[in-house]
Image: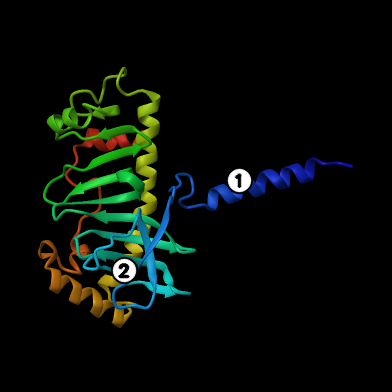
Amino acid sequence: MNKLPYLIAFIFIVFFINACSSHTEINRSFDPISYMPIEGKNCNMYFEGTPPSNASYKVYWDGKCKNGFADGLGRELSNRGVEFIALYDDKLPYYVYSKHDIDEFKIGNVLDNGDFIGIQFNKYNSNHQITYNKDGKYFILDTNAIGRCNMLFTQSKGQCITKNNIKDKNIITNEVKDALKIAMNEYEKALKIVNQYKDRICSMKSLDNEAYNVMINAYKKYNLYDASYFSICNQNMDYRTNKPQYIIDFLESL
């Protein structure tokens, strides 16, 4: 019996599954798995770690729910000022956007314990940090903040790429290139999902009126950094903005 056709078919199936997987290369640990009730909705959402016992802590969700849990694409908000855009599947999220501060936001694969792979944006300037931060390894491309690089890497294992060493072959090793390439890939994949969310929110398409009202009232009630529910519509999410050409060339050569 000729087993070659079966072998070829098996290889094709494995390749197809890997090619179609949009965010499974880098897995979240989800340990432990906890949930919190969503304010204004009769359903729950994932909460990293142990949910706070303080009843004043609130979480909000402008997406849909399925079988009592957040489902599909939406934005999370807490009354502590933390925002995420997430794609929920089987009760668990794939976080593609986070905002903990009025000045900065992240697009990429937002992982547990502060780990992140993607790009961190500062909305007031071009200081966009391409970051690979996972499992104790930290690689970052930050051309405008050499002092901050020195501070970050005092206790970190990895490399900080600045305008002073971007052409140093002893610094730009294959490990560094691979890490930054993964960060750019995670950013590109996450950006597609973020733009899907923006298309829905910013054009008011398929917006759940109940969820919209709950979120708007949450922003008004907590006055979160004077944020607006629609401020995301005006955020520039292109890493190329105001970047020197040599930076763009370096990233596109990875």
- Residue 216, position in %: x, y? 20, 75
Identify the residue at horizontal 31%, vertical 68% (top origin).
Answer: 199
Q: Viewer-proximal residue, 57 or 132?
A: 57
Q: How is the image coloured?
A: rainbow
Looking at the rendered structure, which numbered label has been put on residue 239?
A: none
SS at mark 1?
A: helix
Q: Amino acid at mark 1?
A: Phe
Query: Which residue corresponds to the image point at 72% horizontal and 47% vertical from the top-left?
Result: 9
Residue pushed farthest top?
170
Question: Residue tagged by mark 1?
Answer: 15
Q: Secondary structure at mark 2?
A: helix
* Picture coordinates of residue 52, whole percent (x, y): 28, 60
Disc 2 and disc 1 in contact, CB within 8 angstroms: no
Q: Is residue 101 visible?
A: yes
Residue 180 position, x and y percent, is 34, 35
The residue lying at 30 percent from left, 82 percent from top is: 210
Q: Residue at image x 36%, y 47%?
A: 112
* Residue 117 in sight here: no
Vertical arrangement, residue 188 with respect to residue 72, above or below: above
Measure how far apart labels 2 and 1 are at the Cα level. 31 Å
Mark 1 crowdedness (10 Å alpha carbons): few <14, some 14-19, many ≥20: few
Which comes sooner in the sequence, label 2 or label 1? Answer: 1
Q: Quadrant of residue 38?
A: bottom left
What crowding class fits label 2: few (fewer than 14 Cα within 10 Å), some (14-19), or many (20 or more)? some
Q: Is residue 222 left or right of residue 118?
A: left
Outermost residue toward the right? 1
State whether residue 176 is above or below residue 36. above
Please state which of residues 25 and 43 is positioned toward the viewer in this rendering.
43
Split into 4 quadrants, where in the image is the C terminus?
top left
Residue linked to disc 2: 199
Quarter holding the N terminus is: top right
* Type of the residue with mark 2: Asp
